[in-house]
Image: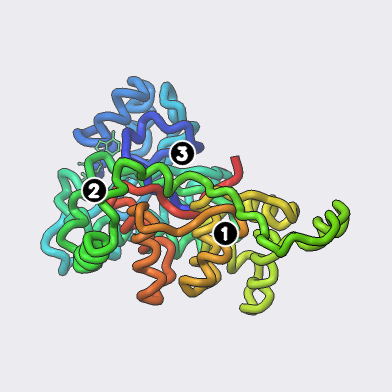
Amino acid sequence: MPIEILRGDITRLAVDAIVDAANPSLLGGGGVDGAIHRAAGPELLAECRMLGGCRTGQAKLTRGYKLPCRYVIHTVGPVWHGGLVGERRLLSSCYTNSLRLAAQHSCSSVAFPLISAGAYGYPKDQAFRVALDAIRDFLASTEREILVILVLWERADFFGADSLHKNVRRYLDAHYDDALDGNRSIAAQEIAPMPQMRAMPAAMPSLEDALRDVEESFTQMLLRMIDEKGMTDPECYKRANLDRKLFSKIRGDIHYKPRKPTALALAIALRLTLPETKELLARAGYALTHSSRSDIIVEYFILQGKYDILEINEALFSFDEPLLGGRAV
Ligand code: ADP
């Protein structure tokens, strides 16, 4: 299942479970914990009182009460003491233990805040990376389909210091066509597939003949490439950050028309070169252009031979661009 990154208020999400960055008493605090208790109502605190607290890195589950989610998973992140006293391992286990608990309760969607990154002082960029690594490792280790949403409350300006971000920014500055800024939507729009240009036939071909000449469709090209690369379907949709359902839809419909972020995600999963990526996109009626910031960012990664979808999404997110991948709606 895909990992999504959202900016917003976790208390508003109608997922199966939201995770609370609690303190060891589980009796309420500030930050996201305070927001969750306020939105859930006093019954949440009453149930928390019966849990007898929670150790750092562990997780406990309650009902969601007035929240739109079914459950709240309470986990206690480590306080940051400089990074040398096991903070990373403990933070990672918050995510793993919360996800285990969610799986035990048959949750198919779970939202996390950036645990420890507020009052507990964990540097946000590191907390973000630990979160993504732990979530990815958990999802790779399970057959279960769980959608995981990482919710950031504040602007992700903490990415700026990172050298990857600086390199992407440099590439963007060099290639983004500012003159077209006003027309940004053009890049995001579909470009109708060009009809094949051919010499004028002496007589009009029959419809049957014309249809026989139609190029390979997006789905056909995708499936051919998966075979050529010796990949399995699950390898492909996991690397594309797509859910199985969406992938099955694409596989089952030779004329499927994916959204552009889905098509791009599949190009990344297949580790296509830039020309190959452009060709696959064209089969779905899209182009890769320098008037779109997100296209340039993806192009940067392809040219660098970096095909880690989460890393690409992290960069896209930090530049406020839509993320790659998706799920069936
Ligand atoms: P901790 O004590 O584990 O650091 P905090 O609640 O202080 O927990 O902060 C954890 C993260 O949650 C911070 O990045 C904070 O900005 C964020 N946060 C605060 N309120 C919300 C909210 N309503 N939804 C999502 N994230 C939130």
Mark 2 or mark 1: whose residue is earlier in sequence: 2
**Residue 40 image point, x, y percent:** 37, 24
Quarter of the displayed picture in which ligand 1 can be seen:
top left
- The residue singled out by tag 1 in the image is 282
The one nearer the camera, 113 or 329, is 329
> Dot 3: within a 10 Å radius of its alpha carbon, few (fewer than 14), some, or many (20 or more) residues?
many
- The residue singled out by tag 2 in the image is 156
Residue 142 visible in the snapshot:
no
In the image, farthest residue toward the front: 202
- Determine the residue positioned at 62% across, 65% down: 234
- The residue singled out by tag 3 in the image is 17
Q: Amino acid at mark 1?
A: Ala
The one nearer the camera, 127 or 283, is 283
Q: Amino acid at mark 2?
A: Ala
Mark 1–mark 3 Cα distance, whole angstroms, equals 39 Å
Given contact means CB atoms under 8 Å apart, are the residues at marks 2 and 3 in contact? no
Marker disc for residue 218: none
The one nearer the camera, 22 or 154, is 154
Q: Amino acid at mark 3?
A: Ala
> Dot 1: within a 10 Å radius of its alpha carbon, few (fewer than 14), some, or many (20 or more) residues?
many
